[in-house]
Image: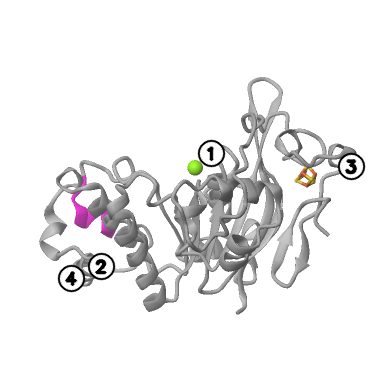
């Protein structure tokens, strides 16, 4: 499959305080293929959401390139920018905070069409009804307000809103983390059905590996603004190569018959260091039980160690 998005040495730094720099995303490179779901996993504060937002230009990159369908998104003229903005959307973690409580569901879903001047009048209304049905709600819901719906229903409204402009690529930023476990699978199934029907490409962000397993074709593991490992979902679960991935997997609490249980549980010592003064060399060194001198001196490159399996660790040959 061809790449829809190519990310090259992307950095997003934020100034904090007087002269400190928070390196939220610190030089990451990866591709997202057309029609796939790339899972992006890591502990909170590791730069996942910042990555997602920078890919669709909700944030300007500090350095590096994002190539979307052959266009460098940080070098677009106004017309190209408008065209790009129609092709990308975001679904947010909190279905309570992300819907305007004063707008009807119909207007929430129709807003994107209004902004991009896509449909008006009857066509707009018909599209809103169609989208409500597509996400498992119904047309009577168009005149109601967000507070009348459950968390799962609100996330369906958020999904309908994202679909209204018929995007190619959607950043799903922890779309199931705030939902009851019983509802999570329904939302994941809906996203999968929509992907198949509409040929969508997803970046699916989550803070734990159990949430991305079923929906992802490939998974990238992030730590302190860097990508530690990226490979197919199958390889990541069956043969994790990076010490951090191994620790994350061993921490999944629910017994999972697909994961080899012979591995011992690895306890991660300490907290994630601050992205304000990240360590030199490997960013995982402070919590890695295999750390050697070279890990403190030199940052490991993300290398393809097996077909379609990339790892950033000096010890993985
Ligand atoms: Fe651990 Fe060194 Fe590999 Fe980093 S490069 S994960 S510190 S062994
Ligand atoms: Mg986040």
Residue 243 spot, x, y in % from top left? 70, 48
Count residues near mark 2 (Cα–Cα under 10 Å), then give few for <14, some for 14-19, many for 20+: many
Residue pushed farthest left?
Answer: 140
Residue 296 spot, x, y in % from top left? 85, 37
Q: Is mark 2 on a helix, strand or loop?
A: helix
Residue at left 63%, top 21%? 17
Count residues near mark 1 (Cα–Cα under 10 Å), then give few for <14, some for 14-19, many for 20+: some
* Mark toward the start of the polypeptide (4 vs 2): 4
Label 4, label 1: how many angstroms apart (C-alpha)?
43 Å
- Is label 1's Cβ within 8 Å of ligand 2? yes
Q: Main secondary structure of the magenta part?
A: helix
Image depth: mark 4 or mark 1 in front: 1
Label 4, label 2: how many angstroms apart (C-alpha)?
14 Å
* Mark toward the start of the polypeptide (2 vs 1): 1
Which residue is denoted by mark 4 in the rendering? Answer: 122
**For the residues bearing labels 2 and 1, Cβ distance under 8 angstroms:** no
**129 lies left or right of 100:** left
Is 87 part of what is drawn in magenta?
Answer: no
Residue 54 spot, x, y in % from top left? 58, 50
Image depth: mark 1 or mark 3 in front: 3
Which residue is denoted by mark 2 in the rendering? Answer: 131
Which residue is denoted by mark 3 in the rendering? Answer: 294
Residue at left 37%, top 61%? 188
């Amino acid at each position: 499959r061809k790449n829809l998005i190519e990310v090259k040495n992307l950095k997003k730094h934020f100034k904090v305080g007087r002269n400190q720099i928070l390196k939220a995303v610190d030089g990451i490179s990866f591709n997202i293929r057309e029609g796939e779901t790339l899972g992006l996993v890591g502990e909170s504060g590791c730069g996942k959401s910042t990555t997602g937002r920078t890919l669709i230009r909700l944030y300007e990159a500090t350095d590096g390139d994002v190539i979307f369908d052959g266009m460098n998104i940080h070098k677009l003229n106004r017309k190209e920018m408008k065209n790009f903005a129609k092709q990308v959307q975001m679904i947010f973690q909190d279905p309570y905070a992300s819907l305007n409580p004063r707008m009807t569901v119909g207007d929430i879903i129709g807003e994107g069409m209004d902004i991009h001047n896509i449909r008006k009048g009857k066509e707009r209304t018909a599209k809103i009804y169609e989208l409500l049905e597509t996400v498992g709600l119904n047309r009577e819901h168009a005149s109601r307000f967000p507070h009348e719906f459950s968390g799962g229903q609100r996330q369906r409204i958020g999904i309908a809103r994202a679909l209204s402009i018929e995007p190619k690529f959607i950043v799903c930023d922890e779309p199931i983390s705030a939902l009851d476990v019983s509802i999570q699978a329904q939302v994941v199934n809906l996203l999968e059905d929509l992907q198949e029907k509409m040929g969508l490409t997803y970046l699916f962000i989550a803070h734990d590996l159990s949430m991305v397993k079923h929906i992802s074709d490939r998974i990238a593991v992030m730590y302190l603004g860097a990508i530690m490992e990226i490979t197919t979902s199958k390889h990541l679960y069956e043969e994790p190569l990076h010490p951090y991935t191994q620790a994350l997997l061993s921490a999944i609490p629910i017994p999972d018959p697909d994961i080899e249980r012979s591995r011992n549980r690895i306890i991660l010592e300490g907290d994630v260091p601050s992205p304000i003064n990240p360590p030199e060399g490997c960013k995982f060194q402070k919590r890695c039980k295999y750390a050697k001198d070279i890990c403190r001196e030199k940052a490991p490159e993300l290398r393809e160690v097996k077909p379609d399996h990339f790892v950033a660790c000096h010890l993985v040959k």
